[in-house]
Image (cartoon, rainbow, N blue to C red):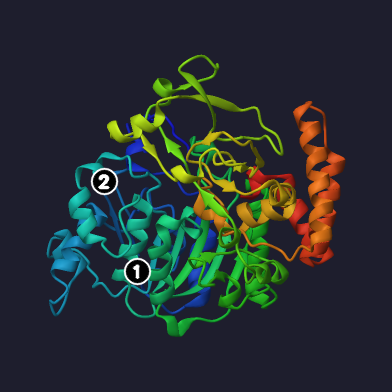
Amino acid sequence: MGRHAKILEKDNIDKRELGYYYTPKFISSYISKRLLMINPNGNKVLDPCVGQEELLEEFFTQDKIVDGIDVYKYKEDYRCNFRQKNFIEYYREIKVLENEAQITFENLCDFDDNEKTSRLDYDYIIANPPYNCHEVNYIKDNKKELQELFDDVGVHNMYSMFISAIIDLAKDGALIGLITYDSFFTSKAHTDLRKKILNNCAIHEVTMCSNDLFHSQAADVRTSIIILQKGKKYQGDVFVSNRPISKEAFQVQLEKQIEGFSTGTNKLYHLSNVILSNPKDNNELIIECPDDIKLLFMNERLGGKFNCVTGISTGKDLLYLSKVKVDPFIIPFYKNPGKNKFFTDNNLFLHKDFLKFDSEIKNFMVRNKHLLYKPGITCSSMGVEFTASRLPENSTFGVNANIICEDKDAWWLLAYLNSELVTYLVRGILNRSNMITSGYVSRIPLINISEQEKTILGDLSKKAYEKAKRKEPYEEISAEINTLVNKIAGITDKTISNIKSFTLNLIKNT
């Protein structure tokens, strides 16, 4: 999620710290309807971050027993059995008491004797977990305790801890309906959370939401609707849907999905087609990935053939880097080509005593010293678009991904990396929402390119490089590269069309 200033509403709700954003009505309706379609006979509901009860209307209408928890009391009167409590603390107490014969919502939330209670045997758990990240005070102030509590998935942000706790709390067969930040689909940091989901739950649905869904609340978050069921034995085929282009289109899409579930006409996928489960991968969730694209991940990876590395982290760029070449800043330094493809002049100059600093200054680190000054390719790390440019000989590089290789390989590989196919492999499959590190780049599948094809791609790459250097357009050359790469990869016309559609609007599709 992008950084935002704290938002103090007229009712003094600090959204930045609480991570609360109101769930749109059509989303709430969809999730609750889906849960009730899968199990129409359940009775008990828990919302562990209940907010203003926006997710619960459908359950109230059907007279379900509903318990709600929230760290903040958003209104005076609740229709659910509400208690103001930190759900993570609630979860901790349950873990302490888990050997008790019976644990009730009452004895954990201190209900009065005359209030309605229900045991922790919920048929449905529905939630819009907090979107705040590792920076919030709660995590910083309780890091050690949280690391012990979530030793299986890690302490990366609030939403991932909520998901983990919900899975642990759910009884066998309980349905879990979430709208949540979806960076955990592909983030390496959330590998263990994905494992936990796959080892403990059936996945019924993953519907990616439009990225403008919460823009009206000043939240730039990429979210998805996820329907799980506690217990692997409930696994059947999975419904998945890629990110729609807008909130308006998404609302129409969800109406059609409900109709499709009612009539049995929605396309479903086998779970194996939704998980990137090769030994070199980390069980990433892949959404509507064409079969011919998934096959490419059986190929050799880039990191198996070339050194794909990071270099120098200064700790404080202003002290050790200069935009101007002036003594002592005389060593060419490539940090991130940004939007530049093939050629980049987006370089800085590093202090000539950088190796001395590495041994003397704690936060100044030089990795892969033996690969510095060698030629190759420097790749983008920030921003949505993935790009690659030539890394000149006798240069140094930063913590972005850099591929060290001789000219005979650098030119054809540069063409491949700047193709639409690789943009899709990186941003549509490997990493939809995070910084592109060397770990992701090293896992890019290579395609079986003949020596003759390498020569052709290399020549095209050199032409694009010269045009980029002169600030001239090179779209026609890129089109030739895309045509040849797609042909070599053996992907279908339909897949090519899907890739083109994806890359034309990367920001809205990732």
Residue 382 position in % (x across, y down)? 55, 39
Q: Is residue 484 visible?
A: yes
Label pair 1/2, CB-CB below 8 angstroms: no
Q: Quadrant of residue 464?
A: top right
Residue 475 against residue 5 in the figure, above or below: below
Q: Earlier in the sequence, mark 1 or mark 2?
A: 2
Residue depth check, mark 1 versus mark 2: number of the one nearer the observer: 2
Q: Could you tell me which residue is drawn at 75 percent across and 29 percent down?
A: 469
Would you name the residue on which mark 2 appears?
139
The answer to whether 304 appears left or right of 59 in the picture is: right
Would you name the residue on which mark 1 appears?
167
Q: Could you tell me which residue is drawn at 20 percent across and 59 percent down?
A: 148
Residue 428 position in % (x across, y down)? 63, 56
| Residue situated furthest top in the rendering | 326
Q: Is residue 114 visible?
A: no
Q: Quadrant of residue 147?
A: bottom left
Report the amino acid beneath label 1. Answer: Ile
Report the amino acid beneath label 2. Answer: Ile
Q: Could you tell me which residue is drawn at 42 percent across and 54 percent down?
A: 128
Front in this rendered view, residue 478 or 290: 478
Residue 468 position in % (x across, y down)? 76, 32
Query: What number is the disc on residue 447?
Result: none
**Alpha carbon distance from label 1 to label 2:** 20 Å
Residue 171 position in % (x across, y down)? 32, 77
Instruction: Name the secondary structure under disc 1.
Output: helix
Front in this rendered view, residue 10 or 341: 341
Front in this rendered view, residue 398 or 285: 398
